Image (tube, rainbow, N blue to C red):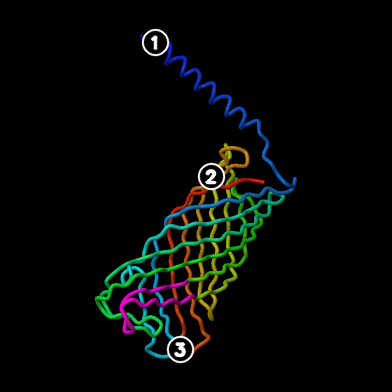
Amino acid sequence: MRSKKAPIFLALLLILVIDVFVGNALAQEPFTLTPWGRFFSGIEWGYQWLSGDFIIPAGGRPGSGARILVGPDLGADQTESVKVFADGKIFDAHYLNLDYFMCLATGLKRIQRDLIFHNRLYPESALVETRVDINWLRFMYAFKLLEIQSWNICPAFGAHYVRCGVTLNGENEEGPNTSNTRKLDAVFPTLGIQARFPAPYGIDFKVEWEGMHLITLGLISYLDVTTDWEIYPDVRLSFGFTNRLVSSVEDNQELNNEWFYNLTGFTGGIAFGF
């Protein structure tokens, strides 16, 4: 017969193991390359809801492009995302961030109206496969300007490079299985503001917003609300909400390429300190 003392013994053993683990974690000192800075690098995974539209004419010819809606017309309105990043804090007052965000939204839909994409006509009721590829490179610098009730308020400035590619595969006037791809990019300088709150037990809260409106190019906006938790020295988990918006008009031809994308989603990741 099983001893009645066994559950008590297992509970005491579990408490002892947890106590030793926590004690070791608290006793560990984080590894740093320099005494004046702390740096992390890692990866985030996310799920994004995509909305937006684009007009892609061919060589500026009138009638060679129509406004196409990513969700209602093509069904490419949800996607997974990946972001690799590195960030650092220097002298407890300066913050650096470099990240590269990638997502690929796909859709397969029988379209409900005629669509003209880069001088190719996709007729109503044609079955069209869509790929919307977005790559977003971001660099930001922020510095602590003031402290309000333990919140560090930090002005920020930097630059964003966004590259968007659209591919339509399906029946058009040239044949039943024609692939049509167009890639566009834009660079935006940005200004922003960050609010950071260092909480106990290795938990930090962070709100970031950056944006810019350029009359000749378009506008960009980036919002990130994140909770970082350093569960063990040099091991950090993150959970966040993000919104990315970019709108661009290319003015290098008579009839411009226009594109607008809005990405809203949730992310989670892991990073390692050095």
Q: Where 64 sits versus 43, above or below? A: below
In this view, the residue in front, 163 or 202, is: 163
Q: How far separated are the C-alphas under marks 3 and 2?
A: 48 Å
At x 43%, y 66%, the residue is 262
What is the secondary structure assignment of the residue under circle 3?
A: loop
Tell me the number on the disc at residue 70. Answer: none
At x 60%, y 67%, the residue is 159
Question: Which kind of residue does numbered mark 2 sit on?
Answer: Leu
CB atoms at circles 3 and 1 under 8 Å apart? no
How many badges with numbers are in the image? 3
- Image location (x, y in percent) of residue 186: 54, 74
Label 2: how many Cα within 10 Å (few below 14, some 14–19, many 20+): some
Label 3: how many Cα within 10 Å (few below 14, some 14–19, many 20+): some
Where are the magenta residues, as a range?
165-183
Q: Which residue is mark 1?
A: 4
Q: Which residue is mark 3?
A: 60
- Image location (x, y in percent) of residue 67: 37, 79
